[in-house]
Image: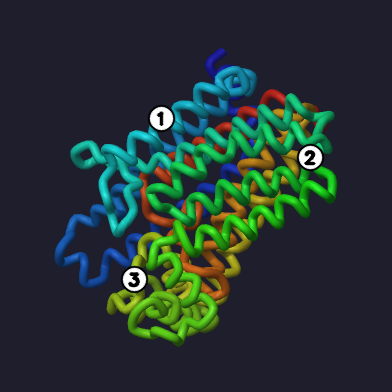
Amino acid sequence: MINKLKIRLLTGYDWWLIAAVILLTFFSLAAIYSVSLAGSVRVNPAFYDFKKQLLAAGIGLVLMFLVGRLNYSFYRATTRLWYFLGLGLLLAVLFFGADIRGTRGWLVFNNFSFQPVELIKISLVLAMASVFGRLARGFKTLNFIIASVMILALPVGLVMLQPDFGGAAVLILLWFSLVLIAGPRHSFLITLAVTGLLTFILGWFFFFLPYQRERLLTFIQPGRDPLGGGYNVLQSIIAVGSGGVLGRGLGFGSQSQLQFLPETKSDFIFAVLAEELGFVGVILLLACFTLLFYRLLILAKLARDDFSLFLILGALCVFFWQFFINVGMNLGLLPVAGLALPFISSGGSAVVINFLLIGLVQSAARGQIRPTG
């Protein structure tokens, strides 16, 4: 009886998807442990960041299985609750949040901190899945575009007020990707493109802060300020290039260990892995991400209703665009946007939310996937 219960509890999950996120977590722990061996270990000999990441991964893994056990219909029924909870936390952080490096994006309680922008990603995925599911036959109507834009506008506006350009970009790209997948009229796409361009121009002159404009200018010409705005990008490119085929070895990367490379545990952790594990290590890392994206595509293909379809595709978009932007900025191909690499970068709230998003996908998979055998 006990064995049958264990089997029933373990069946229905996509174990290849779980394997992908666990392997990515191993990469994360290895990188964070490595950079903790640098000079900062003298200040923090207890490997605080490594232990924090390990704890967050453990909590996230447990929550992933718990969330995955619930029927996806529960999340569909509570979509509004998730959405307004996310908006409430975004409002709270503007009034009560801690200001870190010019961004008011963290709610801090003693030694615990949380980024509401991470939760709003789940909230928006669920909200978009609900809207796209209910308007499954109306993708080519103006009402569909207006409804989805209204749901997007509030969280994006609140995130921009922090200001968090990278977080807002992920939310916008999530929405735009789902709209493209839905297949609206070409006239709507042209209107969206023109609106986006005008919004960017207005943002450049009236809303972007000086450091945000500097990041974009540095992206166009990294060498224009090698000791200022272009320093991070140039050091990252040097780190990636110095890894060679097999890398310098964990704990032996000159850029990370000598602290030339900034934000080694978060924004530029990909450069750390590239330097210390080399081309082979990067290929293995990219293989894990490829497996993650591939399994999400397979689960989306097997979905039987529009809510579960767009929930899975929404999760795929969130992970893909964060991956794409983070790796791009590490290679100097995209502006530095302050975005974490999913499951890799240090950050307790981001790690837990990533696992929760995988849990939602598992819930949709358990309840809505066609039998295959």
Residue type beneath disc 1: Gly
In the structure shown, which secondary structural element does the residue marked by tag 2 occupy? helix
Q: Looking at the image, tell me whether mark 3 or mark 2 is earlier in sequence order.
A: 3
- In the depicted structure, whether residue 324 falls above or below residue 118: below
Residue displayed at 45% across by 32% down? 87
Which is more foreground, mark 3 or mark 2?
3
Residue displayed at 64% across by 44% down? 175
Are the residues tagged 3 and 2 within 8 Å (C-beta)?
no
Q: Which numbered marker is on residue 301?
A: 2
In the structure shown, which secondary structural element does the residue marked by tag 1 occupy? helix
Pointer 3 residue: 262
In terms of depth relative to the viewer, which is nearer, 2 or 272? 272
The answer to whether residue 248 shows anywhere in this view is: no
Bin the neighbour count of mark 1 within 10 Å (Cα to Cα): few under 14, some 14-19, many 20 and up: some
Q: Looking at the image, tell me whether mark 3 or mark 1 is earlier in sequence order.
A: 1
Question: Residue 124: where, in percent of width, then height?
Answer: 57, 36
